[in-house]
Each structure stands twice: as structure tokens, then as C-alpha cells.
Image (spheres, helix red, strand yellow):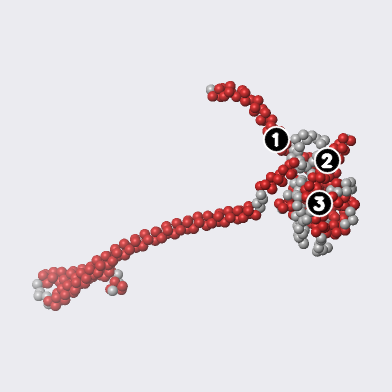
Amino acid sequence: MAGVMETEEQARHRFQLELEFVQCLANPNYLNFLAQRGYLREKPFVNYLKYLLYWKEPEYAKFLKYPHCLHMLELLQYEHFRKELVNAQCAKFIDEQQILHWQHYSRKRTRLQQALVEQQQQQPQAPSHGNTTSK
Amino acid sequence: MAAAEKPTKEKLLSTLDDIEVLSRELIEMLALSRTQKLPQPGEDTEQILELLVQRDKEFQELMQTAVEQGRVHQEMQALEKEVEKRDSDIQQLQKQLKEAEHILATAVYQAKEKLKSIDKARKGSISSEEIIKYAHRISASNAVCAPLNWVPGDPRRPYPTDLEMRSGILGNMSNMSTNGVNGHLPGDALAAGRLPDILTPQYPWQSADVSMGILPPHHGNDFGLEPPGHNKENEDDVEAMSTDSSSSSSDSD
């Protein structure tokens, strides 16, 4: 089964398939879907998830567009996580947290920009403040 | 030497005792001969005198020996002191040596650790240019950082959405008739067999991908493949197509 030699064409194709599949794992709704249909309980599937860990190597990781999938892949190695994913609330929670985290940097940036704007607004008053503080 | 048989002190004391006894006898004899007014036979007195002289000689000799012994004893003490001093010197040197060894051992150990970490860092080194390129790629598509104008209700997500998934190769697998693919997923033929059931095909994407001319190297058991970045472009194209469709679907919503 696994010992059969594949052609280059097939290898390329398989690469693309695995690339797409591993990135789909970043979608918590998809994970919930897989869990509810029992795929996450099957030993061959669990072995496949372990095999997919090769995407963590830098020479493969550079092809990933959605890097969240690597974290999900790591979590999926744990049976507890796979069991929990059957619940829709679990998947929803993960989804919400993921999106909030995704917004983290934009929020940080807007906060920094706001702080900068406030600083600039305060600058014209700076000389008077300086006199009071020196006293 | 005589001292090996009996301590000099004892000998001296015994000689002194003898002298004491002899002289007492002599004095008693003399005193007796005085009171008794008899001419004492001179033999006894002579004997006693001789013995006395002998004992005195012995005594003198023993004193000499004692002095000699005292000197030797003093020398011995001086040497012992020297020995003690040298001993303490050696001990101190030993301590310093131990300390030095300890410091050197620590230094060597830390140097080895450093070398190990250098090796490790060298192994994992990636050109900064590549990292920056990758950072651009994943940020530009908003995959890791939300777009600044994102509001709840925006269909964009940090993971591939349903539409994107369906537009990819996986989504179109039930359209294809290549048997090779199904047989070669390692360890899990089931996943290969079942995935087409999950995703319904919408966009026939497959032919466009392959015609891009990707040439990955092939590793036998490892299944390690390294196609060039064309695949990323495929994902981008998928993204482009799906954002078009998603924007149209959000319009319809």
C-alpha cells in the first residue's frame, strides 16, 4: 500500500492536496464537521494528522498561507482536543477566540495611532506644562 | 643504645637512688665508727667509696646522654614544625587546584553549551529576506492580521472559508478520475476516499494548476515534496475567485 512508487505527477498532486487539507484545519467549523462525523476517532486519520506535522518544517511551512493551521494541527495531536471538538460550542468558542486574536494587531495599531494623535494634540500645550513641572 | 632498653630518666633516677643509699650507708658507718671508737675495717668503707665513685661516674655519663637526647629532641621538634608548615602549604595548594579545576570545568561546560546552541542556530538559520517575503505574503492576504476595516459581518476569516475550500483541489476531487491519488495518501486511504464526499465541487480548478509546470522532487517513503511557490499562487488565485463570489454572496445577503 504505502510502498508503491508514485509518479512525479502524482507526487505533485498529492502535495497540493495535502497543502490544501492542512490549511483547511485552520477552520474550526471544518474541524467540528470532521469531529461530528467521527473522522477524528479513526486511528488511520489520527496517524495521518501525525504525518502532516511535516508542514512545520520551514521548507514546507513557507507555502502555508494560513499559519493558524499549524497550531490547530499541533492541538489535534491530543486526544482530549479531538474529543472536545464534537461540541458545537467548543468550535464556536475557538472560532471567536481565533477571530479576536486575528484582530489583535489591528486593534493594537489603532490604539497606537490614537495615542500618537493624542500626543500630537497635547504638544502645543507642552511648554506651559513644562513651566509648571519645573516649579 | 642504652636508652632503647630503659628510659634515660629512669636510669638517672635509679642511679640517684643508688648514690643516695650508698652515701647514707657511708655516713651511717662513719657515724657508727665515731660513736663506737672502733677502727672499722676499711674494706667496707672502701667498697662503699668505690661504689659511690662508680655511681657518680655513671651519673655523669647519663647526664651527658640526657643532654644529647634533649638536643636531638629539640631538633626533632623543629623538623616537625617544618613538616607541619609544608603540610599546610600542600593543603592550600590542593584547595587552590581544586578551585581552579572547578572553574575550568564550568567554563568548558558553558563553552560546550554555547557551541551547541551555535550549531542549533546555524541549522535553523533562514535568510532574513525569505522571512520578510513570507511575512509579506501572509500579512498581505490578511491571513494573520485582520484588515483594518473589518467589522462583524465581514466574511473574511483567518482560515480558508467554505467557499475557498470548495474551490480548491480537494473540493473538486469527485470531478476527477485519477486513481493514483486515492491510493497514495500514506496511512489513511479513508481520508482520501471520503474527502470528496464532504466538499461539493463548484469551480473546476484542477487543470489550470497542473499546467503551471510544477516540478517537485520525489522522496520515496518520506513523501517530502518541495514544489516551488506556484502552489501559493494557486491558493491566492483561489482566494481571489472566492472573494469575488463571497462579495457577490454578501450582496445577495
Task: Please state if A132 lies on the left or on the right of B197 as rendered.
Answer: left
Residue placed under numbered mark 1 in the picture: A109
Residue B230, how many percent across, how many down?
A: 78, 50
Task: Please state if B223 lies on the left or on the right of A123 as rendered.
Answer: right
| Crowd class of label 3 (few under 14; some 14 to 19; many from 20; radius 10 Å) | few
Quadrant where the C terminus of chain B lies? Answer: top right
Q: Name the one closer to the observer, B137 or B253.
A: B137
Residue placed under numbered mark 2 in the picture: B243
Marks 1 and 2 sit apart, C-alpha to C-alpha, by: 25 Å
Three-letter amino acid code of the residue under disc 2: Thr
Three-letter amino acid code of the residue under disc 1: Arg
Residue B140, how many percent across, how many down?
A: 75, 41
Q: Name the one closer to the observer, B137 or B222.
A: B137
| Crowd class of label 2 (few under 14; some 14 to 19; many from 20; radius 10 Å) | some
Marks 3 and 1 sit apart, C-alpha to C-alpha, by: 39 Å
Marks 2 and 3 sit apart, C-alpha to C-alpha, by: 22 Å
Residue B28 seen from this side: no
| Crowd class of label 1 (few under 14; some 14 to 19; many from 20; radius 10 Å) | few
Secondary element under disc 2, as helix, strand or loop, is helix
Q: Earlier in the sequence, mark 2 or mark 3?
A: 3
Residue placed under numbered mark 3 in the picture: B212
Secondary element under disc 1, as helix, strand or loop, is helix
In the depicted structure, whether residue A109 falls above or below residue A40: above
